[in-house]
Amino acid sequence: MLGGLTTVNEEHITRVTREQWAKLKGKTDWKKVKGMSEAEIAKNALEDPDNPPLPADFFDEVVECTPVSLNP
């Protein structure tokens, strides 16, 4: 809903401290990524079913907004 509050499903939110976050390990194989060409990276991104490309007109109707604190 534009201009309204968005309900977030608390079931999938994991809260961690800054220290815990710093210790987390990602699943990205950065050595493999650094060894790939830009063309290979782009090809892999386009083939990723979880990351479809945005339509060309995606940003045509973007409205800039400033977040408002819910806890003033």
Image (cartoon, rainbow, N blue to C red):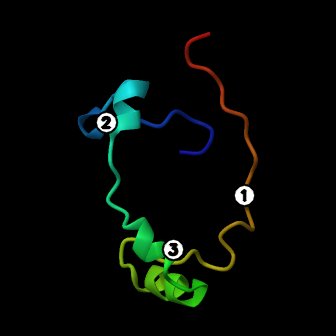
Mark 2 vs mark 3: in front = 3
Task: Say which mark, if any, is on residue 45.
Answer: none
**For marks 2 and 1 on the same chain, the one whose residue lies earlier in the sequence:** 2
Badge 1 is on which residue? 62
Badge 2 is on which residue? 13
Residue 8 appears in the figure: no
Q: Which amino acid lies under the numbered mark 2 shown in the image of this protein?
A: Ile
Q: Quadrant of the C terminus?
A: top right
Q: Secondary structure at mark 2?
A: loop
- Place of residue 34 in the rendered image (x, y in percent of width and height, measured from the top left): 51, 74
Judging depth in this view, the residue of 20 and 63 nearest the camera is: 20
Which residue of the protein is positioned furthest toward the top in this rendering?
A: 72
Mark 1–mark 3 distance (CA, rounded to whole Å): 33 Å
Q: Secondary structure at mark 1?
A: loop
User: Quick check: 31 above or below 22?
Assistant: below
Query: What residue is at 39 percent from the left and 79 percent from the top?
Result: 48
Mark 2–mark 3 distance (CA, rounded to whole Å): 31 Å
Q: Which amino acid lies under the numbered mark 1 shown in the image of this protein?
A: Val
Judging depth in this view, the residue of 26 and 9 nearest the camera is: 26
Query: What residue is at 46 percent from the left and 74 percent from the top?
Result: 33
- Answer whether labels 1 and 3 touch (C-beta < 8 Å): no
Badge 3 is on which residue? 34
How crowded pointer 2 is (Cα within 10 Å; few <14, some 14-19, many 20+) is rated as few
- Place of residue 38 in the rendered image (x, y in percent of width and height, measured from the top left): 59, 84
In the visual, does 64 lie left or right of 35?
A: right
